[in-house]
Image: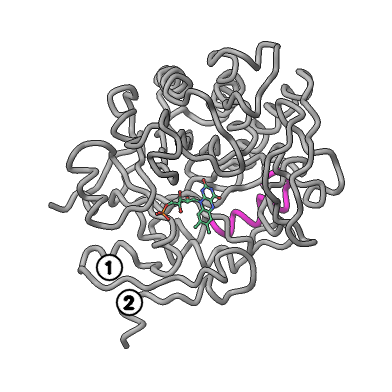
Amino acid sequence: MNYLLSPYTLGDLELKNRVVMAPMTRSRTPNTIPSELNALYYAQRATAGLIVAEATNIDQGGIGGPFTPGVYAEEQVEGWQKVTQAVHDRGGLIFLQLWHGGRVSHPDNIGGRDSVAPSAIAAKGKAFTPNGMKDHVVPKALEISEIKAILQQYKMAAEYAKAAGFDGVELHAAFGYLPNQFLSDQSNQRTDEYGGSVENRSRFVLEIMEALCKVWPSHRVGIRLAPSNIYNDVLDSDPPALYTYLVQKLNDLNLAYLSLMEPTVKEHENPNFIYQVAEYFRPLYHGTIIGNGGLNQEKAELMLEQNHADLIAFGQLYIANPDLVERFRLGLPLSEGDRRTYYGGDERGYVDYQAYADLNS
Ligand SMILES: Cc1cc2nc3c(=O)[nH]c(=O)nc-3n(C[C@H](O)[C@H](O)[C@H](O)COP(=O)(O)O)c2cc1C
């Protein structure tokens, strides 16, 4: 049983294995422009079948956290070119995750502007800012013309990602950021065509996907959903209804993939949640599914064997095991990442985790 290490054809791309490096914010890009340090980090992990690079801001008004990269200016494109070149030189493939924080983009992170969202409802909890943790603010509810402008920003970001040499793009529609704020009925209480019914709440996400597919062939565009996660205080009253509708609509677009995260909440906490996410959506979605969330090699193999997913994304395991594929192949022990250096800092805890062979030489 070695599904994980077998190749996979993703649209017109040949993945050398089914191991995906999950997108991870590491807050190592102080001026929004990716650097040689970022390029080294991704190049070290290029044996993954596919890398999905960290959440990347599509505009200054949507910066989701301090020290995170952007993809809305020429200098950022040049920075990303170093990253994509380094990954390609090592035989890897890399998509970029497109990000807009919406109401959790704290004004301190966006040059003092207003945070924006479908409705003027603050998220519970706090935001990382350069000035410490701060309460989320009450955002400004977007006007229709402003929604259209943000759609345009996504499209521009997709263009920039292409110029930067990425192999594709993924919409971050999970974890309580702007697209997810439109989806959930707690954060979206609009009464126009972007709010109310599941059709209306899905509109923004589907319009973004259509915009991205105008820039890229649809088989180079993915989407990430986390229907059973409430990070950043997004809660929906009926996730099965919402996500069944959305996933079925996504079928029409012939995307590269649907990336799904398994729940982080316990079953008794939200009885109407879906607790086997990939398994639930497998019969509803006709394309490639990436499974993710708390998986190790054994659980990932089982998920592939049971045909609940086609590819498996690993997040935390990739932090301390740049050669994760090789460790899986040879059954080598895994290194433990240091949580204190997950977000922010320098090369320590970022590019100084060694491949197993180097650790023991
Ligand atoms: C440090 C860190 C940063 C993350 N940043 C992102 C991100 O930018 N975008 C995203 O979609 N998920 C992000 N995630 C979630 C991961 O992609 C993944 O879904 C999660 O870690 C669960 O997978 P795992 O159990 O294999 O780690 C992040 C996770 C971690 C640990």
Query: Is residue 181 something one can see in this rendering?
Result: yes
Q: x and y percent of residue 30 in the render?
A: 71, 63
Q: Are marks 1 and 2 in contact (CB under 8 Å)?
A: yes
| Residues in magenta, as a range | 71-83
Colouring mode (rainbow / by chain / secondary structure / one colour): one colour
Specify whether 131 is left or right of 193.
Answer: right
Q: Residue at x 60, y 36 (%)?
A: 158
Q: Residue at x 58, y 27 (%)?
A: 184
Main SS, magenta residues: helix
The residue that mark 2 highlights is 356
The residue that mark 1 highlights is 327
Q: x and y percent of residue 140 in the render?
A: 81, 31
Q: Is residue 361 magenta?
A: no
- Quarter location, residue 67: bottom right
Q: Is residue 79 magenta?
A: yes
Residue type marked 2: Tyr
Extreme right residue here?
A: 112
Closer to the camera in the image, 28 or 6: 28
Q: Residues within 10 Å of mark 1 (few under 14, many from 20)?
A: some
Q: x and y percent of residue 235 in the render?
A: 56, 32
Please report whichever mark, 1 or 2, sits nearer to the chain's N-terminal start.
1
Q: Quadrant of the C terminus?
A: bottom left
* Residue 151 disc label: none
Q: Residue at x 35, y 42 (%)?
A: 291
Position of residue 29 relative to residue 281, above or below, is below
Q: Residues within 10 Å of mark 2 (few under 14, many from 20)?
A: some
Q: What element does badge 1 sit on?
A: helix
